[in-house]
Image: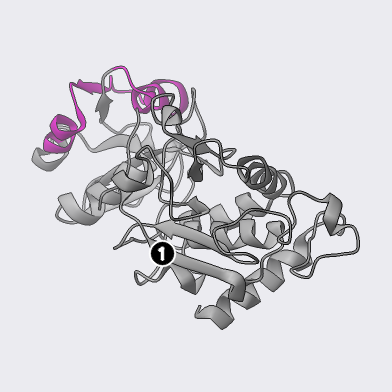
């Protein structure tokens, strides 16, 4: 199911980048100042064809929302996607003061034609249809399925999969969300099946089910904007083929391979996992259920 949530000061971002650099393997860490071999490194700031020489221009929507960003200020380094963007910038060799943010609407960011950004980060699901108009980086986030409920329900205080065993749960038919109920939670009660998430949400509101399972972006939107007293119980272990978020670049961009390489490095050294736990799990937004 493909969805998109519609729902530090610069100095702080610098500190965040410094912390990330300290954790990075020495042979992967780059510098904003080109080295003697920079001329042979096509992914160095001095050799990459960015919109502004020596700087990295990053696009995102306005407004932007937590937990992906914080206080509608992409440049403050807070929130999962802001932190990921600065981590990618650091791996490419750009310090925080050489990063510029611009506002780009979601639809314009993935429309065909030249782009005003070097890359855009805005919870873009990687799809074959979108690949016809833009490039995507390697995925920086695999969307997990999430249990949501309302305050006061029997599962509102659930902390583990075991706490959900006797719950009446539901999800949209034919989705990874439903698969997560049957294969991961395995409740004793037969799960309810709905034609769409609106029907599932209505069942939650009227008490037909104790909770419903949706992907994480939808969980944030439903509990934050659509449900009175909505509550995220927690994220479930990965199941099925997950939806993937990628950075968006101009079609055929010379930066795509460099940005993908940076994302792969951040995944392989554990940085993305750390940022995910910091901003999506441990910030109180969506704890992980085991």
Res. 98 in view:
yes
Check disc 1 and report the residue beneath it. 102
Q: Give the x, y percent position of residue 56.
A: 58, 62
As drawn, 100 above or below 141: below
What residue do we see at 46% from left, 38% from top?
143
Q: Give the x, y percent position of residue 45.
A: 71, 60
What residue do we see at 43% from left, 55% from top?
116
What residue do we see at 17% from left, 21% from top?
195
What residue do we see at 81% from left, 51% from top?
41
In magenta stretch: residue 196: yes
Left or right, 43 with reference to 187: right
Describe the element under mark 1 as helix, strand or loop.
strand
- Most extreme residue toward the right is 36
Q: Give the x, y percent position of residue 241.
A: 49, 24
Q: Give the x, y percent position of residue 123.
A: 41, 46
Q: In the picture, which quadrant includes the N terminus?
A: top left
As drawn, 33 above or below 191: below
In magenta stretch: residue 138: no
Left or right, 176 with reference to 197: right
User: What span is colored magenta in the figure?
Assistant: 174-203
Q: Depth check: 245 or 191 in front?
A: 245
């Amino acid at each position: 199911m493909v969805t998109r949530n519609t729902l530090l000061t610069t100095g702080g971002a610098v500190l965040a980048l410094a912390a990330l650099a300290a954790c990075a393997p020495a042979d992967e860490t780059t510098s904003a100042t080109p080295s003697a071999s920079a001329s042979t490194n096509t992914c160095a700031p001095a050799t990459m064809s960015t919109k502004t020489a020596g700087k990295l221009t990053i696009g995102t929507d306005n407004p932007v929302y937590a937990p992906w960003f914080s206080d509608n200020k992409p440049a403050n380094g807070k929130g999962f996607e802001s932190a990921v963007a600065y981590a990618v910038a650091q791996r490419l060799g750009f310090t925080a003061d050489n990063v510029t943010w611009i506002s780009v609407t979601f639809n314009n960011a993935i429309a065909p034609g030249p782009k005003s950004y070097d890359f855009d980060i805005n919870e873009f699901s990687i799809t074959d249809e979108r690949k016809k108009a833009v490039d995507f980086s390697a995925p920086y986030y695999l969307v997990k399925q999430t249990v949501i409920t309302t305050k006061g329900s029997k599962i509102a205080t659930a902390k583990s999969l075991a706490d959900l065993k006797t719950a009446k749960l539901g999800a949209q038919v034919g989705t990874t969300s439903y698969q997560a109920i049957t294969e991961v939670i395995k409740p004793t009660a037969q799960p309810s099946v709905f034609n769409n998430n609106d029907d599932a949400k209505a069942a939650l509101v009227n008490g037909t089910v104790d909770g419903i399972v949706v992907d994480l972006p939808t969980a944030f939107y439903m509990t934050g904007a659509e449900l009175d007293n909505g509550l995220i119980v927690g994220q479930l272990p990965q199941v099925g083929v997950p939806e993937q978020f990628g950075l968006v670049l101009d079609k055929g961009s010379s930066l795509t391979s460099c940005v993908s390489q940076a994302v792969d490095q951040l995944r392989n050294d554990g940085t993305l996992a750390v940022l995910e736990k910091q901003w999506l799990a441990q910030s109180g937004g969506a704890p992980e259920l085991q």
